[in-house]
Image: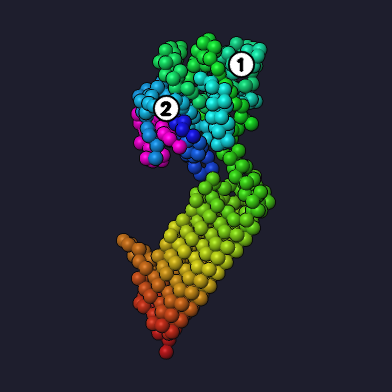
Amino acid sequence: MNEPVVVLAAGKGTRMHSSLPKVLHPVCGKPMISYVLDVAESVSNTEIIVVVPKENGHIKDVVGNTVSYSIQEEPVGTGDALLSARRLLDGHNNVIVMSGDVPLVPTELISTLIAKHHETHACVTLITADVEDTDGLGRVVRNPDGSISKIVEHDDASVDELGITEINAGIYLFDTSWLWDVLTRVPKSKSGEVYLTSLIDYAATDNKTVSTVKADNEYEVLGVNNQIQLSVAEGYMREKINMAFMLNGVTIPDPKSVYIDSDVVISSGTTINPNTHILGKSKISARSEIGPNTVIKNVVVGKECKIESSYISDSNVENGVSIGPFSNIRANTLLGSNVRVGNFVEIKNSKVAENTRILHHSYIGDAEIGKNVNIGAGSITCNFDGSRKNYTEIGDSAFIGSSTMMVAPVKIGIGAKTGAGSVITSDVPDGVSVMGVPARIKK
């Protein structure tokens, strides 16, 4: 489609009572405005313009440089916001206007809006919805023949108009040859703002065609203006995400207790147990079992893994790994295939090769551990010397006895063994056994 899209994102969002710009509040791990821009990109192959306030650094940092920006100097209404983008829309016959705080709108609804606009040759086509709670929303007032006569704001509505359940969603497609001529003539409201809704009155008065498309349900056009509405949007999106995974073969016995972010990928055959959070850009391969009581954030999980009652972030877990219960796998960790991590184990910034076991009450930090290694209970890599982190290297098939303290930097050789309670302060050659405090080679 050749229609440019203007996304209005300059509102103060004072009802959120937050220092974070309203459109950046996350829904299922992604800022609200990102959902709107995803839809805009899918329906338009031309200009996308985001209208931002003067203080806009946070928004630009999140949205990036793939769009154009227009600055609304003062927050004086949606009409003024659209006017601020006029210079960027020269040469375009139509323009779609969306709101950065309406994150649940589906692509199909905007596509229907475009088709209806061209089919009816309207000067403006808008999206409406029937809602249960109309408080604060503009009502769509229709003539006996069903055509729109006006949109009346909640504060200006009569008693009869307050009973109308059809509301304006704030999403429009305008014919610009009509739009710019009329918008510049719209007077300010009592509050000193210029509203796009005023254009409907002008169109009806001039006997212009005003077309509408009605959303399938009110959630599709839910505007987020406060923390309660944000939680409603989150709940709707979360249910939608979980249902989609279940329809594609992911087992979620209790979807109401499972939280999955919008950018997560889960293969069929996987089970997600209750009270589990899968966040960020995590990816889980087939036939794995995650949870219960587990948090996974920005983690790639291989096939046939089992992770229970544990926290894992910013790491890679290869095929056949088991973790937990009650372990913490921190950033920049790679667990090779068939690694077993048991209970109360913390690992960070480390590589653990295949078939290695770290089963009880251990800390592994800034380390590289070979394959087929056994780390005994209570073992610790003492990686911090008070000013910097130091590295520990453990060779293939080494056996680390319970409660071994490995004082980095240190290297333990292939097939080496440490006795229980040993303190390793110097490198251990391949194949030898050491014990004691400090550890000495066993004769």
Asked if residue 106 is among those painted magenta in the image, a careful observer would answer no
Kind of element beneath mark 2: loop
Report the amino acid beneath label 2. Answer: His
> Is 219 located above or below residue 386 in the figure?
above
The color scheme shown is rainbow
Asked if residue 60 is among those painted magenta in the image, a careful observer would answer yes
- Which residue is denoted by mark 2 in the rendering? 92
Picture coordinates of residue 108, whole percent (x, y): 58, 35
> Is 162 located above or below residue 99 in the figure?
above
* Residue 304 as seen in the image, left or right of residue 407: right
Labelled disc at residue 147:
1
Q: Residue at x 56, y 14 (%)?
A: 150
Picture coordinates of residue 288, whole percent (x, y): 60, 60
How many numbered discs? Answer: 2
User: Which part of the image, by quadrant, shows the C terminus?
Assistant: bottom left
For discs 1 and 2, the disc positioned in front in the rendered view: 2
Q: Which stretch appears magenta?
A: 45-65
Task: Please name whichever residue, 427 or 194, is drawn nearer the observer in this view of the structure.
Answer: 194
Picture coordinates of residue 230, whole percent (x, y): 54, 34
Task: Please name whichever residue, 311 or 260, is drawn nearer the observer in this view of the structure.
Answer: 260
Kind of element beneath mark 1: loop
Report the amino acid beneath label 1. Answer: Ser
Q: Residue at x 35, y 63 (%)?
A: 389
Labelled disc at residue 255:
none
The 10 Å Cα crowd at callout 2, few under 14, some 14 to 19, many 20 or more, is: some
